[in-house]
Amino acid sequence: MKQFFGMSQQGNLDEALQGLRSPQFIMLLSNAGQFEEHVAALERRFPGVPSIGCIGMSYQTSVAEHGVGIIAFSEGVTAAANVLEHASTMPVKYIQRLELDMKSVGGSNGDTVCIDFCSGNDACVLTTIYTALHKRGISLVGGTGDQGKVSANGRVYQDAVAYGLVRNQNGRVKTYKENIYHQLGNYRFVASHTDRANYVLGALNGRSAKQVYQDILHVTDEEILTRTFQNPFGKLNGDDTCIISIKEVKGNALACFRQVNDSDVLILLELGDYRAIVQNTIQQICRDFPHRSAIFSVNCLFRYKLFTEQGYMQNYLRDMAVLGNHAGFVGYGEHYNNRFVNQSMTCVVFE
C-alpha cells in the first residue's frame, strides 16, 4: 500500500490534493471556516471513495495549523467508511453499520485497523465501537476533532463518530500508544464528588482536588492549567495508565478533558525524557516492522503545545520521518482500542 499526504496552509483543497491518484480511503483534516465546503468538494472530486474527516491540524514533516490536510491510502487496501450518530446518547443504535462494514471489508487483527474521528463523548463511543471490533480482534486508533463536527462519505455530522475500516492487502498492521509520563512519588488518590457529565473531579481522598494538586506541586490557580503539561493525573487501568489532563479550575474542583468517576484510583504523573521515549518507540516499530508502508498517528494538542514550547516539534516530526511515510493529526483526545486518553500519541503501522 501507499500513503499520500498533501496540505495547504492557505486552505486550498486543490493544492492539498495535487498528485493524489486513485485513492482507496481518504482522511480530511480541515479548518472550522472551510470544513463543510471541503467535505463537499472532496466528495465531488473522488465520488464514492470511502472518506472520513474532522476539524483539526495535520502534519507530516511540518504542521498545517489553519489550512487543510489530506491523508489517503491507495494501491493495496480495502476500506469502508461510515458514521455512528447520537454519540452523546445512543451510538449503539447504529452499531449494525459497523458490523456490516466489518463483513464487507473482511480482515482480522493481523491486517485490519479501525480509524475514528469523534465529536465528543469519547468514552461511551469507544466502549460501543469496541464491543463490535474486539470480536474480530481489530484494533482502533483515532481522536477527537474540534467544533463537534465530523464527516463521512461527503456528509457532515454533529454528535457523531466517523470511522474507517482499513484492511492492508499486502501485509500486517499494528497499533501503538506512547506515554511520555511516569508516576510522581507514591501518591495514590480515590476520586469522589465527581460530575461525570462535565468531567469534573471534586475531591481526592476526601479533600478538595484543587487543594491537593496545589499542596503537592506548590502552584497557583493560574499555574495549574500550564502545569498539567508536566504533571497530569493518571488513571490506573490494569497494567496501563490513562492520562487525564486538567482543563480548568472550577471553584475547589478541577475540570478535566476526560471523565473521572467516583472511586476511580488516580495517581500523579510527571514528564519523562520524552526525546528518549520517542526514540524507543521508533526503535520498537523498526524491530516489529523492518519494512513499513505507512504510519498514521494522532498526537494530543497538549503534546503539540509542549513540544512546540520546548522547541522540539519540528525535530519530533523529523525523528518520526525516519520510519518512512509518517503523517497524522493533532487531536483533542486520543483513542486506543477502548481507551480514551490525553497527552498521548497513538498510531497504526502498515507493513
Image: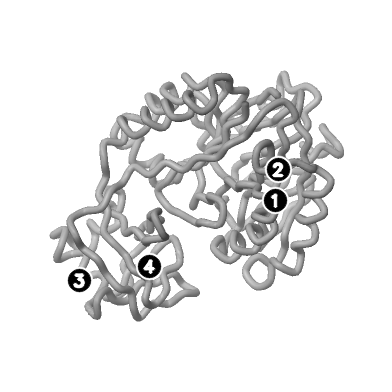
Which amino acid is tagged 3? Gln
Q: Residues within 10 Å of mark 4 (few under 14, many from 20)?
A: many
Q: In what quadrant of the picture does the N terminus appear?
A: top right
Q: State the residue at coordinates (86%, 39%).
A: 48
Say what secondary structure mark 1 lies in: loop
Q: Quadrant of residue 119?
A: bottom right
Question: Can residue 289 be seen in this snapshot?
Answer: yes
Q: Mark 1 points at which residue?
A: 136
Q: How crowded is mark 2: few (under 14 residues within 10 Å), some or many (20 or more)?
A: some
Q: Which of marks 2 and 4 is in front?
A: 2
* Of pointers 1 and 4, the one earlier in the residue sequence: 1
First in sequence: mark 4 vs mark 3:
3
Where's the C terminus, which quadrant? top right
Mark 2 → mark 3, Cα distance in angstroms? 48 Å
Left or right: 320 with respect to 264? right
Q: In this view, does 77 lie above or below 83?
A: above
Mark 2 = which residue?
108
Label 3: state its secondary structure: helix
Counting from the top left corner in percent of width and height, residue 156 is at 73, 53
Q: Residue 194 carries which label?
A: none
Task: Report the Cα–Cα distance between label 1 and label 4.
Answer: 36 Å
Upstream in sequence: badge 2 or badge 4: 2
Task: List the residue tagged with mark 3.
Answer: 211
Local secondary structure at mark 2: loop
Q: Given the image, on which type of amino acid does mark 2 rest? A: Ser
Q: Distance between the residues labelled 2 and 4?
A: 39 Å
